[in-house]
Amino acid sequence: MKIKKYIANSMPEAMNKIKKELGAEAVILNSKEIKSGGFLGLFRQKKIEVIAALDETSPSQKPIRSKKEISPLSHPTSRMDETVLTEINHLKQILATNAMQQQHEFPPVYEHAFTYLKQQDVEEEIARQIIENVLAESSEENYSKEEMKHRLTSEIERNLIFSSGISKEKRVIQFVGPTGVGKTTTLAKVAALTMLEQNKKIAFITADTYRIAAIEQLKTYARILNVPIEVAYTLDDYQQALEKFSDYDYIFVDTAGRNFRNEQYVKELTKLIDFDRYEVETYLVLSLTAKATDIITTYDQFQQIPIEKVIFTKMDETGTFGSMLNINIGKKKPIAYISNGQEVPDDILLPDQSFISRLIISGYTNG
């Protein structure tokens, strides 16, 4: 039997060499990845080492055996047959691994982090940019879990736009958003926080006249906080209410929550509320439990309105927080507040870059 070792850049290249020198009847005895070349242990290249063998006894020269002496191909009886099957399976694994590696954009540790960000619903381009920035700082490929978490957290924090809380320059604080995001409760939380912690004089206006329950809900909060409230059915009602509360520090305005896919709703909102005449700051309220694609669609739908900041609700109801990056980094909009429960005024947070970045990376583990 003739046995020979081959070193090639890839398995197909090795197979071609074997076929050329030993012929099509050769069999693979062993194959493995090795590293060769380089200088002082650096810049070494991955190679494939293959051990091949050829039984030099020609099939035509072998004695003819009876059918009883010939074993079925599906039931190998010799050690050589078992070796060949083992090496074929090993070759399949190598080819499958090579195919997977070709699909990856980054070294394994970085690829794992890239996959995690996408699983957090971070848009692919934003996730890719974060990983590329981390990779650009160091080409180290064997980071520990804690080190990669630290680097990811720092990179996300560095890219976030910070501007939490309500503006001190604006008096009218308007809340808009789709139905079901907890807009009215969030308004009450922010208003209570402003009144109790900053000792501000506040008032309520509700323009959510589509739902009686919404009006009653805000009236209940108004009674609890002991603040005045007006209901605005028209633009004139809205303007009169603003004039009535002209000596208040802040006026919190609740608007109707409707299907975010309904363009007519946003058009009606622009007719009901004067966004230009008064010192207005408009907040778009979004739920973290919604699909990432729906959150982006909602944001785009409200572009007819001058949105200044975003509030995310229902943080306590999900473990997926990537949409905050999609809005903050992708759309360049600050996150003013994050709601994490139903209690008024307790369950509301004033986030900074560190809080958001740590929240997004909180579930990261190094696989």
Image (cartoon, rainbow, N blue to C red):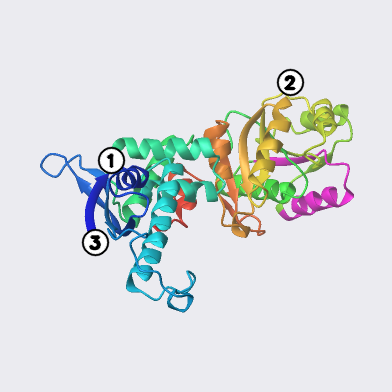
> Of circles 3 and 1, which is in front?
3
Q: Secondary structure at mark 3?
A: loop
Other-residue count near label 2 (Cα within 10 Å), few / some / many at <14 / 14–19 / ≥20:
few
The residue located at (33%, 69%) in the rendering is 80
Q: Position of residue 222 (x, y in %)?
A: 76, 50
Residue positioned most to the bottom: 68
Residue for badge 3: 1
The reply to whether residue 250 is visible in this rendering is no
Q: Amino acid under label 3?
A: Met
Q: Position of residue 286 (x, y in %)?
A: 67, 44
> Of circles 1 and 2, which is in front?
1
Measured along the vertical axis of the image, is residue 181 above or below residue 207? below
Residue for badge 2: 277
Chain part drawn in magenta: 201-224
Q: Earlier in the sequence, mark 2 or mark 3?
A: 3
Q: CA distance from mark 1 to mark 2?
A: 54 Å
Other-residue count near label 3 (Cα within 10 Å), few / some / many at <14 / 14–19 / ≥20:
few
Residue for badge 1: 139
Please check the rendered image and state whether residue 105 is part of the magenta-colored stretch, yes or no: no
Q: Earlier in the sequence, mark 1 or mark 2?
A: 1
Query: In front: 302, or 138?
Result: 138
Query: In front: 241, or 252?
Result: 252
Q: Amino acid under label 1?
A: Ser
Q: CA distance from mark 2 to mark 3?
A: 94 Å
Query: In front: 291, or 21?
Result: 21
The residue located at (56%, 57%) in the rendering is 319
Q: Secondary structure at mark 1?
A: loop
Q: Position of residue 145 (x, y in %)?
A: 35, 56
Image quarter for residue 284?
top right
